[in-house]
Amino acid sequence: MVQTATATTPNAGQQAVSIALRGVSIGYDKPIVEGIDLEIRSGEIMFVGGGSGCGKTTLLSCMTALRKPLAGSIEIAGVDLAKASEEDIQRVRRKFGVMYQLGALFGGKSLLENVRLPLEEFTDLDDRAMDDIARAKLGLVGLGAHAHKDPSEISGGMQKRAAIARALALDPPIIFLDEPSAGLDPVTSADLDALIVALNRMLGTTFVIISHELASIFAIGHRFAMLDGARKKLVALGAPAELRDHSPDQWVRDFLNRVPTAET
Amino acid sequence: MSARNDGNASSFAGEVRNMAHATAVRVDTSNGMLRVSVQGALTAETVGAARASLVKALPTGGSSAVELNLAQCHELDASGVSIAVFLFRLTKSAGTTFSVTGIDGDRKLLVDLALRGQEPVPAGSPLGLVREVGRASLFIAHDLYDLVRFIGELSIVAAHVATQPRLLRVRDTIGGMARHGTDAVPVVSLLGLLIGTIIAFQTFDPMAKYGAKLQVADVVAISVVRELGPLITAIILAGRSGSAFAAEIGTMKVTQELDALRTFGIDPVRFLVIPRILAVVLVTPLLSVYATILGVAGGYLILGPEGFTLAQYIDEVRQALTIGGFLQGLAKAAVFALLVGAIGCLAGLRTGQGPGAVGLSTTRAVVTGIVSIVVADAILGSFFYALGI
């Protein structure tokens, strides 16, 4: 990537709320985490993390309207996803893009076709205009020269970047990333961090990143929301370095300082 | 939205309007330089119309350089920047220079990033058809090469296993016989019986015109024993077992199980292919005989109600059949099984990457398998005829 990733914390007071979670409980038969109150600001890079099994991927499913929370409200663009009709949910889905852990690119389609797909489905643009837009998005993630490749022909890191390009296809104001660094080497992971920072700064896109990759959280995260499956609640919210050094919660400090637990 | 020619060949302009604001695209040419200026917002909402306006206004003559001026563009997003990509690719294919002016900071970075690695617009080639034919020929040649190579590899491994029987996966072979033989009995029964019945039904009236109603038994016996019994069994085999071989081995390849076998020093052909092929080669002739018996019995379902006794029918069938004809059917069934098994396994081993690859291999196994069966049937039929069998 062209630049080094650095986190520049946006001015909290002046920013509109992009996603608002109020009293949210998530889980399946039983709640995994309860009473989450969280406001994600417009233009923010927000990390959501915690230990394995703490419910972060379930929370992502709720925020992307793939499942309903057990209780509470999740508001995006003025719509409460917990109570919204399918029509309203479809409308809200245009406001965000999602990059899944393994990229979830459509096999048998080139990268260009993958990025074009949302444009074909949701715009009236002509064929060549869609091509140019898809190429621009691939260029932004550094894959301009690989537009005609199949997802199986590129590396895992490139697949994730292509998935970000696809998430950007309709220029949504919010992008959710599920474990973007998982399975990547540290350099590729740092490249991806730099890309997120560049897109955040250039486009003002809000990034909600599900991850427990500490290097990325400290490098580019404006804020970190930490879930604890054992206590079934949101245990910390704030600037990552601040939480690491000054959180009143010992477990949060240990987690962010990578202190082994007694069992290990 | 409108595009306007000012009357002066060196200046064109187009304007795009949307609800919130207007976007104007101006195209000027001077001293061989083409200058495109955008005024207003260049975003996902306006870029489609802006691009259409630009395409309409672009002069047909070549320019030595193209400049995109975004000084008056007050809003630029990741879709809007595709205008730069469009002009950049156009100039790259024409071999002219391209520059973007009037922006700096993050906007410049946005444009620079979007232009990275973009390829020129491909020129249409009059040799397109020739190239496609060549490409298809190479593909077929590659397929044939793979098939020949696989047959060679299979023969070597089979010879090796024959000399050292302990290398044969006996349990897998017996399991395969049960799965691809016993489990296929219901469908073979149904189709075998119906095929004999249908032949008798369709030939009864024409034969009756010549007073040869009982000779319908001859038609049924000869066609089912020599041709249709083995053919129907093999087609069922291609649909059930050939596709299963391709899917099983293909999935193993996608999930790197074949690599794991190789790293253990285990040859996948010996471990996976030989037991499967042996199982179907052993079991298919038996299934074919079973289908044949039911097919012949199916013929009596038509002749019985017409007043012929079972003894008459069996006697007529016995006269029509020869040992040579019966052996011909058995030999065909074994060859068909070999083809279906080998093609299914080869399709599995050649599975590519990606979620669609296994499906593609399965389709290839079934289609190639059925085509091969019919072609082999024609060749073997001619061969046995020449031998007088």
Image (cartoon, grey):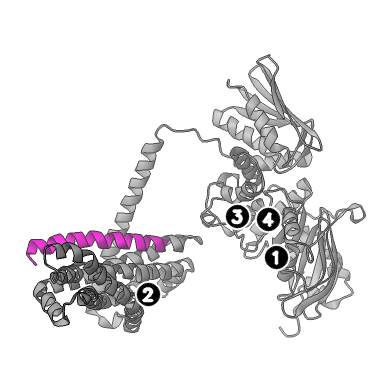
Q: Amino acid at mark 2?
A: Ile
Q: Within 10 Å of the Cα at label 2, are there few (<14), some (14-19), or many (20+) other Cα atoms?
A: some
The x, y position of residue B28, in whole percent, is: 69, 21
Q: What is the secondary structure assignment of the residue under circle 2? A: loop
Q: Is residue B368 magenta?
A: yes
Of residue A190 and residue A159, the one placed in the foreground of this image is A159
What residue is shown with label 3?
Answer: A158
Distance from the alpha carbon under mark 1 to that under mark 4: 25 Å
Distance from the alpha carbon under mark 1 to that under mark 2: 44 Å
Q: Compare marks 3 and 1 and give the one earlier in the sequence.
A: 1
Marks 3 and 1: which is nearer the front? Answer: 1
Distance from the alpha carbon under mark 4 to that under mark 3: 9 Å
The x, y position of residue B103, in whole percent, is: 77, 34
Q: Compare marks 1 and 4 and give the one earlier in the sequence.
A: 1
Q: Is residue B136 visible?
A: yes
Q: Within 10 Å of the Cα at label 1, are there few (<14), some (14-19), or many (20+) other Cα atoms?
A: few
Q: Compare marks 4 and 3 and give the one earlier in the sequence.
A: 3
Where residue A77 sits, quadrant-wise, is bottom right
Q: Amino acid at mark 4?
A: Leu
Q: Amino acid at mark 3?
A: Met
- Indicate which disc residue B266 carries: 2
Q: Within 10 Å of the Cα at label 3, are there few (<14), some (14-19), or many (20+) other Cα atoms?
A: some
On the same chain: label 3 and label 1?
Answer: yes
Q: Assess whether mark 3 and mark 2 are in contact (beta carbons under 8 angstroms).
A: no
Distance from the alpha carbon under mark 3 to that under mark 1: 26 Å
Q: What is the secondary structure assignment of the residue under circle 4? A: helix
Segment colored magenta: B361-389
Q: Is residue A233 above or below residue A79?
A: below
Q: What is the secondary structure assignment of the residue under circle 1? A: loop
Please state the chain letter of the residue tagged with numbered disc 1 in the rendered image.
Answer: A
Q: Is residue B39 visible?
A: no
What residue is shown with label 4?
Answer: A192
